[in-house]
Structure formats: structure tokens, C-alpha cells
Image (cartoon, grey):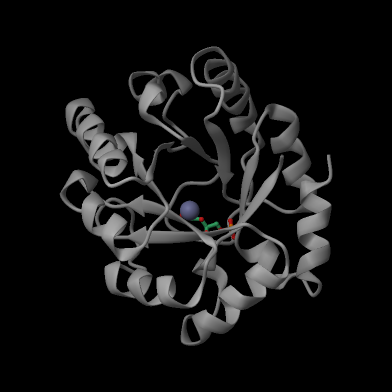
Amino acid sequence: MIKVSPSILSADFAYLARDLAVVKESGAPYAHIDVMDGLFVPNISIGLCVISSIRKVTDLTLDVHLMIDRPVRYVERFCEAGADIVTVHVEADTEQNTLEALRKIRACGKKAAVCVKPKTPAEAVLPFLDLCSLVLVMTVEPGFGGQAFMADMMPKVQAIRAMIDARNPACELEVDGGVNVETAKTCVAAGANVLVAGSAYFKAADKAAFVSAVTAE
Ligand code: DX5
Ligand code: ZN
């Protein structure tokens, strides 16, 4: 099943409850939440207290993408704040600390995930795959919404799809960055099953139609 995870980075932060209700109403099962620390990426977005507030007003699956340095320091607090899926970047710490972060997330009863930036090869997810409920492949450089989709990431999506099918078939494969109705088809053809969409989703006049169009198989 193909799922859309609308990125609230493109929502109106003054009206998050309203925009999360719109996401729910449109039929999307997840809400993608981008956490940026101004260090791992050159931008600062939202953090723990906003996620705690969001948790109180929505039953959407909160798909939290941590673009923060050494996330092992904070993953338990994101779980306590109400995240359902917690994604850490493989580039953000040592292999040992990333493994520890994934184990901590799972010990909290939440879904653990790793993410790879565009320049990071597919093989970088291998040490973590057995602990992951989801792998996220960036199709833009992380940090900002509204960037152009990198179609040259599709061989990496295909390679990780093959690894998942061989080693951990229940694991989801998500793409993030520049996803719209057209590029979504390219991602699904390459093996992705969860599609983050920020600007394309929030710009769509008919969001239910957007969800239907990108999830049509
Ligand atoms: C970028 C974020 C994305 C972003 C996607 O660093 O990880 O989730 O919100 O936005 P669009 O869909 O506009 O590329
Ligand atoms: Zn993201």
C-alpha cells in the first residue's frame, strides 16, 4: 500500500491544529514532522514542545524526521513527546551511537528508522536494517522544503528496496523531497511505499485528490 506523509514544514505554523485536521480529512495516514537543529542542517524548525502539543490534537501517525546532530541524546524525549516513527540520519553520529539510538526508540515501543542524505550510498543503511521499521531516502539535500526532486536518487531507492526485500520485508521505504504527483510515480516505480510531500501537498487545492493521485497503483 502506498502512503502519503504530508510534511507540516509547509503548513502554517500558526494554525497547526487546523492543518493537521486537513491532513487527516484528505486521507493521509501520516504527518511528517521535520526537526532541524541549525547544526546538522542549515535551518531551524520545531522541537519537542511543538510535537507534544500536536500529539494532543491528532491521531495521525507522527512521522518525525530528526535532522539533528547526535540524535541519540534526544530520541527518548521525542518518543515521550508523542512521535510514532522516529528517524535518525546515519550521517549524524557514529555507527555505534546510531545503533544505540535505534534501540532506544524501539525500547520506547516506537518505530525506529534511518535516513540517508543524497551523497550517502545505499550500503550505509545495512548495519541498521534489522532494527528499522522504515528507511528514508532523501531526494533533496535536507534543510528546506520546495526544492527540486533529484531523480538520480532512484537507483539508490531500488538498491535499498532490494535490501529490504531480502532482509526485512516489513520495513517501509520512504522518500522525502520534491515529491509531487509526477515524481511520486517515479518513486513508487523504484520501490518506495511512503511518500513525503510538503509544498506540493499544501499547494494542492484538492488535497484528497492529491492523495488519491499519488497513491494510485
Ligand atoms: C527537507 C525536509 C522535507 C521537506 C519536504 O529537509 O526533510 O520533509 O519538508 O518538502 P517538499 O515536499 O516541499 O520538498
Ligand atoms: Zn523530512
Q: Does 185 sit left or right of 52 as displayed? A: right
In which quarter of the view is residue 183 placed?
A: top right
Where 54 sits versus 144, above or below? Answer: below
Who is closer to the viewer here, 57 or 210?
57
Q: Residue at x 37, y 77 (%)?
A: 53
User: Is residue 38 visible from the viewing direction of this image?
Assistant: no
Q: Does 140 sit left or right of 119 as displayed? A: right
Q: Residue at x 29, y 43 (%)?
A: 105
In which quarter of the view is residue 88 placed?
A: top left
Q: Residue at x 20, y 44 (%)?
A: 72
Q: Does 146 sit left or right of 135 as displayed? A: right
Q: Residue at x 75, y 36 (%)?
A: 186
Who is closer to the viewer here, 162 or 131?
131
Tell me the quarter of the image containing the C terminus: top right
User: Is residue 32 visible from the viewing direction of this image?
Assistant: yes
**x and y percentages locating residue 154 in the rendered image:** 64, 29
**x and y percentages locating residue 44 in the rendered image:** 33, 67
In which quarter of the view is residue 36 placed?
A: bottom left
Q: Residue furthest top?
A: 166
Where 160 sits versus 184, above or below? Answer: above
**x and y percentages locating residue 70 in the rendered image:** 20, 45
Who is closer to the viewer here, 37 or 59?
59
Q: Does 214 sit left or right of 15 as displayed? A: right
Tell me the quarter of the image containing the N terminus: top right
**x and y percentages locating residue 121 in the rendered image:** 44, 23
Where 31 sits versus 135, above or below? Answer: below
For the image, the number of numbered tags is: 0
